[in-house]
Image (cartoon, grey):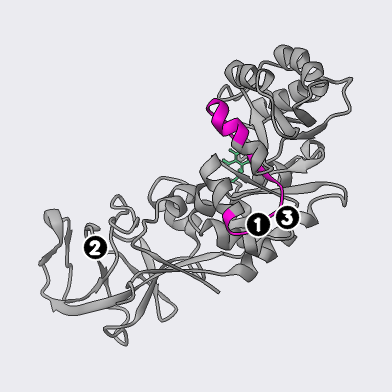
Amino acid sequence: MSRLVTATIDTAALQHNLQQVRKQLSADVRVVAVIKADGYGHGLVTVAHALYQAELYAVGCLDEAAQLRKASIEKPILLLEGFEGREELQAIAQLQLQTVIHSEQQWQLLNTTILPQPITIWLKVDTGMHRLGFTPQRAEQLLPLLEGHPSVEQVVLISHFANADHIEHPLNQRQQQAFSHCCAQSSSARSFSNSAALLTRSAAHFQFVRPGIMLYGSSPLQGQSAASLGLKPALTLQAPLIAIQTIEPGAAVGYGSSWQAQRETRLGVVAIGYGHGYPRRLPSGTPVLIRGQRVPLAGRVSMDMMTVDLTALPEAIVGDLVTLWGEGLPVDEIAQQASTISYELLCQLTSRVERIAQ
Ligand SMILES: Cc1ncc(COP(=O)(O)O)c(C=O)c1O
C-alpha cells in the first residue's frame, strides 16, 4: 500500500530557484548548493540531481557525501563540519571531497596524516558567530602552513553570518569587516554568504556563495515573502481527507477538547499528524488548502490525524487532497504559525512521508 502522506518535490522549482540565485551574482561567483540534512528534507540525491548546475554541493557529514558518491555524483562536495578522526580524513581523500577545518584537533590530524592525494581545505574563520572556527589571528597563522602543506591542494577561507536574515543587525557589518581584514594579504578564495546574505550583501559574495533555504523556495529574509523574491516552493506536503462528520454547536474536538464548535460544524479529518512531522504546536486557525480554498485547523494535532473546519467548503469530500504547505500555501506562513522557521518544518518531515520527485 502506498503511503497516504506525500511530499511532492518540484525539481523544476529547484532549478528555477538556482537561477534566481545566479541573477544576484556576477558571472565569476560560484554556487555551493547547501543540501545537508537530506536536502533540507527534500531528498539528498533528488536535490543533487536537480541542482546539477551548481558548482559544488555542501553537506553536513561524511555519510551524506558518501551517499552522493554512491549515487555516482562526481561533482565537488564540501563537508561543512569537517571530519572526526583519521579514518574520516582518509575517506575524504578517497572520495575526493573537500572539507572545512574548524578546530585544532582537525588541524593536528591533517598535519599528521599522509593522504593518498591532496585535498581542498576550507579554513573556517570565526568572525563573530562563535559556533565553529578559528579566531582571525589563528587563521592568519594557519593559512601559510596549510598553503605549503603536501596534503593540501588549495585553501578557501570560509565564515558564516549569525544574523544575515536580519538585514540591519550591527553584527553583520562587524563580521564582514573581520572577514575582509583576516588574511588580507592572501589571494585565497573566500566564501561567506548564505541565502540571506547573497540577497542583501553583494560585498560579501566573494568567490563562492552558499545558498540553502532559498533553493527550496522559502524566504531567507524576515518580512519578505518567497514569492516577492521570485522563489517557487519546491516541496508540497499533502494528505487526504479521510472522514467528514457534522457536529453540534458546543461539541468539543480532539485531545484536550481544546476547540469547541461555535455553530453546527462540518468537520474534516486529515490523515497527517506530528508522527509525519506536522507540528503539534500549530494552533487552531492555521490554514490548510482544499480545492484551492483555505480552511482552518480545528483542535489539537494528533499523531496521525488532524481536524479542519469544512463548514465554509461544503463541496469538500472524503478523498480530497489537503495541502499542508507548498504550492499555494507558503511554508513560511505555516512556520510563523508554529513560531519557528521553515528550515525546521522541512527538515523534520519523517520517513512516513513519501517523497515523490517530479
Ligand atoms: C555554514 C553554512 N553555510 C550556508 C548555509 C545555508 O544557509 P541558508 O539555508 O540560510 O541559505 C548553512 C545553513 O545552515 C550553513 O550552516
Q: Nearer the viewer, mark 1 or mark 3?
A: 1
Q: Amino acid at mark 3?
A: Ala
What secondary structure is found at the residue carrying circle 2?
A: loop
The residue range painted magenta reads: 70-90
Q: Residue 178 in the image: x percent, y percent?
A: 74, 21
Q: Residue at x 75, y 40 (%)?
A: 201
User: Residue 73 bears which disc, if any?
Assistant: 1
- Quarter occupied by residue 20: bottom right
Split into quadrants, the picture shows ligand 1 in the one at top right
* Residue 304, placed above or below residue 4: above
- Quarter occupied by residue 307: bottom left
Q: Residue at x 70, y 59 (%)?
A: 18
Q: Residue 86 in the image: x percent, y percent?
A: 57, 26
Q: Which residue is mark 2?
A: 304
Bin the neighbour count of mark 2 within 10 Å (Cα to Cα): few under 14, some 14-19, many 20 and up: some
Q: Is 166 left or right of 25, judged from the image as shown?
A: left
What secondary structure is found at the residue carrying circle 3?
A: loop
Q: Amino acid at mark 2?
A: Asp
Q: Count up the numbered dots.
A: 3
Residue at mark 2 to residue at mark 1: CA–CA distance: 36 Å
Residue at mark 2 to residue at mark 3: CA–CA distance: 38 Å
Please report whichever mark, 2 or 1, sits nearer to the chain's N-terminal start: 1
Q: Which residue is mark 3?
A: 54
Q: Kindly tell me whether residue 208 is visible in this rendering.
A: yes
Please report whichever mark, 2 or 3, sits nearer to the chain's N-terminal start: 3
Q: Kindly tell me whether residue 166 is visible in this rendering.
A: no
Closest to the observer: 332 or 52? 52
Q: Residue 156 in the image: x percent, y percent?
A: 77, 32
